[in-house]
Image: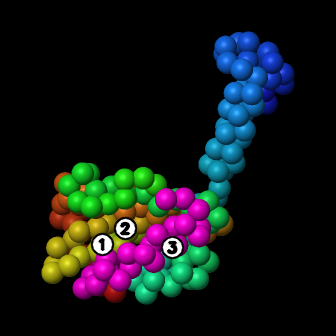
Amino acid sequence: MLRNAFDYPYRQIADIIQVSEAAVRQLVSRARKRVLAERRTRVTRAEQRRLLTAFVAAARSGDLTALEELFAADVTSYSDGGGAVRASRFPVAGASRVARYVKAFAHHFWAGVDVRYANTNGQTSALLSRDGKVFTVLTVDASAQGIDHVLWMMNPAKITAVSAASPHSAET
């Protein structure tokens, strides 16, 4: 960043990249926020699993308070249905909004769901299945602030590979 590394004034940066000074200020602000967010210290694998397990329990019951307490203030929920299944097309952000979003579909989403845990991409994920068939791979990314991201993989093409590769998962 020209502003922080070289102490360039906003006006000079604006001239260099040919945008307005206000746009430069906004870019610098966004960059600072992103750098700070990326500096969050990840939790241990054991803590990530604990948070995922607590999230599953709170989500299943639709416990709004428990969900909000698990989340970092800027938590974001992402869903990938691959266009093949119903899933949120847009990320949902903020502890209160994500908690309300999860609660809104708790009753019908979790009905008849069995949960197994497996290691996917180096962290614990919950494999959600109905009638023996995995329909969602759910995981969370977390830091000392709480759960930062809730990731719902619902794309059948991607789930096939995960469910086939994890036959030794522990039942809950």
Asked if residue 48 can be seen in this view, the reply is no
The amino acid pointed to by label 1 is: Leu
Q: Position of 106 compared to 31: left or right?
A: left
The label on residue 138 is 2
Q: Which residue is mark 3?
A: 100
Asked if residue 75 can be seen in this view, the reply is yes
Mark nearer the N terminus (1 vs 2): 1
Q: Nearer the viewer, residue 160 or 91?
A: 91
Query: Eyeballing the image, is 114 above or below 16?
Result: below
Q: How many marks?
A: 3
Q: Which residue is mark 1?
A: 127
Label 3 to label 2: alpha-carbon separation = 18 Å
Q: Nearer the viewer, residue 10 or 88?
A: 88
Q: Position of 27 compared to 64: left or right?
A: right
Q: Is residue 93 magenta?
A: yes
Mark nearer the N terminus (3 vs 1): 3
The amino acid pointed to by label 3 is: Arg
